[in-house]
Amino acid sequence: MPQYNILKTFSENITAQRQYQAKILDTLILLDDQGYIVLDPDTDESSITLKGLLKINNTVFSN
């Protein structure tokens, strides 16, 4: 039976989580740059803008 290295598995999981978080942050920044959301760096919250709501509604109604 091969030896199981829990530290390696934990480290790989942390790395994968950080990569996922970086992708989410990149997407949020892109949406902010395009005016679809507003990012609040003081609270780490995001709010959808009217432009973002209109984009969502147009997409939903088009499908």
Image: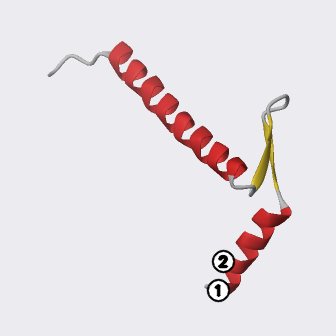
Q: Quadrant of residue 9?
A: top left
Q: Residue at x 29, y 15 (%)?
A: 5
On screen, 21 above or below 34? above
Q: Nearer the viewer, residue 57 or 34?
A: 34
Q: Residue at x 71, y 79 (%)?
A: 58
Q: Nearer the viewer, residue 18 or 5?
A: 18
Q: Nearer the viewer, residue 43 or 49?
A: 49
Q: Measuring from the top left, give residue 6's x and y in whole percent.
A: 36, 17
Q: Measuring from the top left, give residue 62's x and y in whole percent.
A: 64, 86
The amino acid type, in three-letter code, at marker 1 is Ser
The answer to whether residue 22 is left or right of residue 30 is left
The amino acid type, in three-letter code, at marker 2 is Thr
The answer to whether residue 54 is left or right of residue 34 is right
Q: Residue at x 53, y 41 (%)?
A: 23
Circle 2 SS class? helix
Residue hosting label 1? 62
Q: Find the residue positioned furthest to the left.
A: 1
Question: Residue 59 bears which disc, if any?
Answer: 2
Label 2 with label 1: CB-CB less than 8 Å: yes
Q: Quadrant of residue 22?
A: top right
Q: Residue at x 78, y 33 (%)?
A: 44
